[in-house]
Amino acid sequence: MRFLVAAAYWQTVILLGGFFAVVLWKLFTGGISLNGLLDGDVRDPNSADGFSSEASAGRAQSIILTLFVALWYLLQVIHNPKEFPRLPNTMVGVLAGSQVLYLGGKARAMLSGQLRNLFK
């Protein structure tokens, strides 16, 4: 029984390590592009498709906070791998607020273009 547990553990480590290595390799070789990762779309009647791209503070804060929470969670799992850690309520609230700010900014950017076009 002990052998099966150890084998399952190492198979999981190898599988996840392989996924991680492939993603890193694709990032470094350009197979996965990070261009425009922090850009958001806004309505632009002057562009061919009706949208243009600009830097998005909401997207940047959302990514940073999400990565922070994911890293915190990973460290908690590494510290005690026998049980799932509980996220503090304040952390869940801050993460939810971050997502609401991001989605609110995205909705504002999309709707402001429609309102501008309506009044022209």
Image (spheres, rainbow, N blue to C red):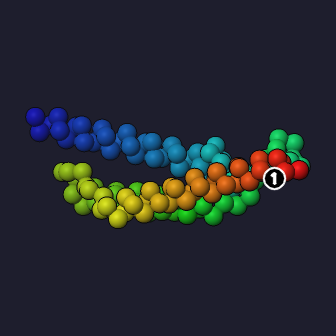
Query: Residue 96, percent across and down?
Result: 44, 56
**Which residue is at the far left?**
1
The amino acid marked with disc number 1 is Arg
Taking the spot 45% from the left edge, 47% from the top edge, the residue there is: 20
Instruction: Locate the N terminus and report the quarter of the image it occupies.
Output: top left
Taking the spot 45% from the left edge, 42% from the top edge, the residue there is: 19
Taking the spot 17% from the left edge, 38% from the top edge, the residue there is: 5
Residue 116 vs residue 60, the one in the foreground: 116
User: Can residue 2 be seen here?
Assistant: yes
Task: Say which quarter of the image contains residue 85.
Answer: bottom left
Query: Residue 10, percent across and down?
Result: 27, 42
Q: Secondary structure at mark 1?
A: helix
Query: Residue 89, percent across and down?
Result: 31, 61
Residue 47 vs residue 23, the one in the foreground: 47
Taking the spot 65% from the left edge, 48% from the top edge, the residue there is: 33
Residue 81 vs residue 36, the one in the foreground: 36
Query: Residue 102, percent across and down?
Result: 57, 56
User: Can residue 75 be seen here?
Assistant: no
According to the picture, the residue beneath numbered tag 1 turns out to be 116
Task: Say which quarter of the image contains residue 104.
Answer: bottom right
**Which residue is at the far front?**
119
